[in-house]
Amino acid sequence: MTNLWLQIKYLKYLPLDQFTDKGSHKYNFRCPVCLDSQQSETKKRGWATEYKNNLNIKCFNCDYSSSFQYFLKIHFPNYYSDYIKEKFDANSYIPVKQSNIDLFAQEYSSLNLLKIKDLPIEHKASLYLRRRKLPINIINEFYYSENFSEWLNTDIEEGAVNYKSDSDRRIVIPFYNQYRKIFAIQGRSIDYADPKVITHKTDKEKDLLYGLDTVDFAKPVFVTEGAFDSILIDNAISVSGSMSNINAILKYTHKDNLICIIDNDFRNKYTDKFQERIIRQGYKTVLWPRVTDFKDLNEAIIKGYSKEELMTIINENTFQGLNALARFKLRKL
């Protein structure tokens, strides 16, 4: 983790008035030091810009200038302590692309799990994942259990799940935090059992977010409901089936940096009501055109859409604020 990545993360988390990401690591906002123009609420002359892998803060109204760390310490001390702690902890960060260690197997080395890549090609779990057309490199990081609930209750935590079955065959998906430490384990049934998904947190304090180890919060982040959907597009994170978890992501980035991709099911009263709520909360959201013929990203890929085609649809149909609300209401007519 670089200093710049961490500084951008905390910058976007600060309650800066009229904060705007201008791209190329340039950020504009009303200066919290001089409170900017007292005559016009639209003027904002505070800037954060990159210089030698760090952010510098500059106001072109009061001429304030400092490093980001000093700016945080003096003006946002409540955030400063968390920033320093995370900066220190980041020394143990393991970039995913540089790690060849099977961390899940390392932590649970004595447990009877099989890696998907080690299963016969005709195995039902392998067939299930290939039919979902998921990326091979991601599939190879998943595991398989013949009886997930029994394994969870016996080898992970007694009474972890109140579910018993003679056969509970599931894909096992590890959840990693941004430091590649496991904090949850999810089992997805390949037999369409009820419940379809069982998720157990090994760290009860963590929010159920899938993709923390791979997402770059310095870039726009796409938020999906399911884990499978999140691995089909670049820089996405999953709220594990419940969009009500979206506020948990605000610990890592600014609201304006998120694009919510809710399932394409606007006739569902729950989905419809929730989408209106996040629009009113100010989130960017994708409002799927009526002509689209899929429920979610995974179904779109299965039906033959390419990632590039999906991203075009997403980018052309992402709205925020009053524009989003107007289009949301128009779509219901």
Image: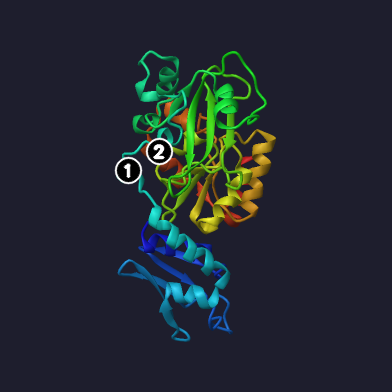
Q: Is mark 1 on a helix, strand or loop?
A: loop
Quickly name the residue at label 1: 99
**Going 40% across and 22% down the picture, which residue do you hit?**
130
The answer to whether marks 1 and 2 mark residues whose Cβ atoms lie closer than 8 Å is: yes
Q: Measured from the top left, where is residue 220 in percent x and y? A: 44, 53
**Going 58% across and 22% down the picture, which residue do you hit?**
150
Amino acid tagged 1: Ser
Q: Is mark 2 on a helix, strand or loop?
A: helix
Q: Measured from the top left, where is residue 285 in percent x and y? A: 55, 48
Q: Say which of 24 and 3 sits in front.
A: 3
**Residue 148 disc label:** none
Q: Quadrant of the C terminus?
A: top right
Q: Measured from the top left, where is residue 163 in percent x and y? A: 65, 23
Query: Hey, which residue is sitting farthest front in the picture?
Result: 110
Q: Say which of 51 and 222 sits in front.
A: 51
Quickly name the residue at label 2: 103
